[in-house]
Image (tube, rainbow, N blue to C red):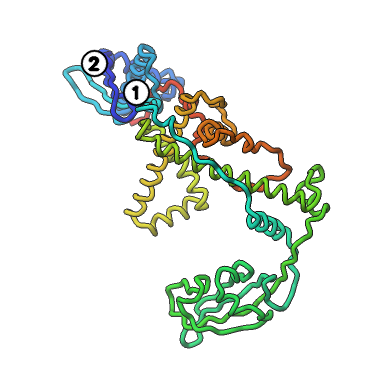
């Protein structure tokens, strides 16, 4: 069996295996014995039928497929054994075969693990901008109010004020006064702040009050008629319910309920300190991701290059599509969304996801190369949350004295909603073992 390989242009190897007719005949006996194990024939115990009977009752294309798979698998294993430098990943693809005399020439491609090409060292002159993450008084106040609202008491009241939340029924009518559709929305502090029309329309109104307004697209979007049947001319607005929002006092009892009995947060002053530090921590992490992303964008292409193989791109794409499916809430809803988009927009949407997957992988491997070049003291196999980005900021950030942003405090309660998944691709190199060609499929009777 003759084997050749050469480096391809896209992080892969182009492999050629030449199989002689004698090797095919030898492999045929092996494949028939493999099929024989599951073959059942009257007068013989399972797995004991004669090989010629097995061959006679098995589709020729399945036998030929088994022969090729067996010999390709054997050829690839020999190739890997004889060439330690090959770091092949994934499964073979782009199969082609050509008959040359009595021989069959099989060509295929196999991906290799990405290697970053360093074009120059100019990237080491880059400095990450200083991150300013101090919490503002407005952010602290808003966070405190938001926290209180999560545990607020909603009490019955009659009149709409800035301290209430109200349920408003909407009834859309046509020119003849016929009801086209009904719905409801909620009006509270946020609506009053964002759109003065809410205050003009509802402030001071009582539970049970109704008002008919002329329908117009100039109304706030929530009052737009969404259906295609009929034409809305009027909207009846009914104040169905009004609740007064009573915010809790952040006393020791409430704080114990929030943080648990072992918490060191015992009063509102300590709560404010906790909120201040949490906001600063979240802002720092969010900015840290941005500045490192900015560095990688500068380095990519200009100072370092890396080709990402099809195997890794497809895996990352599959992961992103699985996440997208979960966000849509199932296959049916996602399919419906793509139908609405149309074929061209759907293709662009998916192409963009695949391009983002490739871009993310490029940055991931470049980041690993930067860590290696700077000799950063990090656990590269299982890095902690933003450990690599933090160490990189300490090394390349302006001033270089950023250890006070370590943020490994052990708070009793975590209000952070910040998530980061830009570069931690789960230590991909350790997920790939020496690859084999697919095994021969079981027999299919004629």
Checking the image for residue 21, the label placed there is: 2
x 36%, y 11%: residue: 82
x 62%, y 47%: residue: 134
Residue 23 image point, x, y percent: 28, 14
* Residue 394 located left or right of residue 145: left
Residue situated in front as seen by the camera: 306 or 289: 289
Above/below status of 302 relative to 245: above
Residue situated in front as seen by the camera: 196 or 354: 196
Above/below status of 346 relative to 432: below
Distance Cα–Cα, label 1 vs label 2? 15 Å
**Mark nearer the N terminus (1 vs 2):** 2
Checking the image for residue 69, the label placed there is: 1
Q: Is there any visible trace of residue 348 in the rendered image?
A: yes
Camera-side mark, 1 or 2:
1
Residue 200 image point, x, y percent: 59, 79
Q: Secondary structure at mark 2?
A: helix
């Amino acid at each position: 069996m003759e084997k050749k390989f050469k480096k391809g242009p896209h992080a892969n190897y182009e492999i050629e295996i030449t199989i002689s007719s004698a090797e095919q005949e030898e492999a045929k006996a092996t494949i028939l014995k493999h099929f024989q194990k599951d073959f059942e024939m009257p007068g013989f115990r399972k797995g004991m039928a004669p090989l010629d009977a097995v061959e006679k009752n098995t589709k020729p294309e399945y036998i030929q497929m088994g022969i090729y798979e067996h010999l390709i698998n054997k050829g690839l294993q020999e190739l890997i054994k004889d060439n330690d430098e090959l770091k092949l990943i994934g499964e073979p693809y782009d199969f082609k075969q050509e008959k040359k005399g009595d021989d069959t020439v099989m060509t295929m491609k196999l991906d290799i693990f990405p290697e970053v090409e360093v074009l120059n060292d100019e990237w080491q002159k880059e400095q990450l901008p200083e991150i300013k993450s101090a919490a503002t008084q407005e952010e602290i106040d808003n966070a405190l109010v938001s926290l209180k609202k999560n545990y607020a008491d909603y009490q019955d009241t009659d009149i709409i004020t800035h301290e209430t939340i109200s349920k408003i029924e909407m009834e859309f009518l046509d020119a003849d006064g016929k009801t086209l559709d009904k719905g409801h929305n909620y009006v509270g502090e946020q609506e009053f702040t964002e759109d003065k029309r809410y205050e003009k329309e509802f402030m001071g109104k009582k539970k049970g009050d109704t008002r008919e307004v002329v329908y117009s697209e100039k109304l706030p979007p929530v009052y737009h008629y969404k259906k295609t049947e009929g034409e809305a001319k009027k909207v009846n607005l009914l104040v169905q319910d009004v609740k007064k929002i009573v915010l809790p006092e952040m006393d020791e009892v409430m704080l114990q309920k929030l943080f648990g009995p072992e918490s060191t947060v015992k009063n509102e002053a300590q709560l404010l300190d906790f909120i201040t530090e949490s906001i600063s921590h979240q802002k720092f992490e969010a900015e840290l991701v941005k500045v490192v992303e900015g560095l990688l964008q500068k380095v990519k292409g200009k100072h370092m290059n890396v080709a990402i193989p099809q195997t890794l791109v497809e895996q990352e794409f599959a992961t992103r599509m699985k996440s997208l499916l979960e966000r849509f809430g199932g296959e049916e809803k996602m399919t419906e969304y793509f139908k609405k988009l149309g074929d061209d927009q759907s293709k662009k949407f998916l192409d963009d996801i695949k391009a983002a997957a490739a871009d993310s992988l490029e940055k991931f491997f470049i980041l690993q190369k930067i860590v290696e070049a700077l000799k950063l003291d990090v656990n590269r196999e299982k890095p902690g949350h933003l450990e690599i980005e933090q160490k990189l900021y300490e090394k390349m950030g302006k001033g270089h004295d950023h250890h006070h942003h370590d943020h490994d405090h052990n708070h009793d309660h975590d209000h952070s909603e910040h998530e980061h998944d830009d570069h931690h691709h789960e230590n991909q190199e350790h997920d790939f073992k020496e690859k084999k060609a697919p095994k021969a499929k079981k027999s299919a009777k004629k």
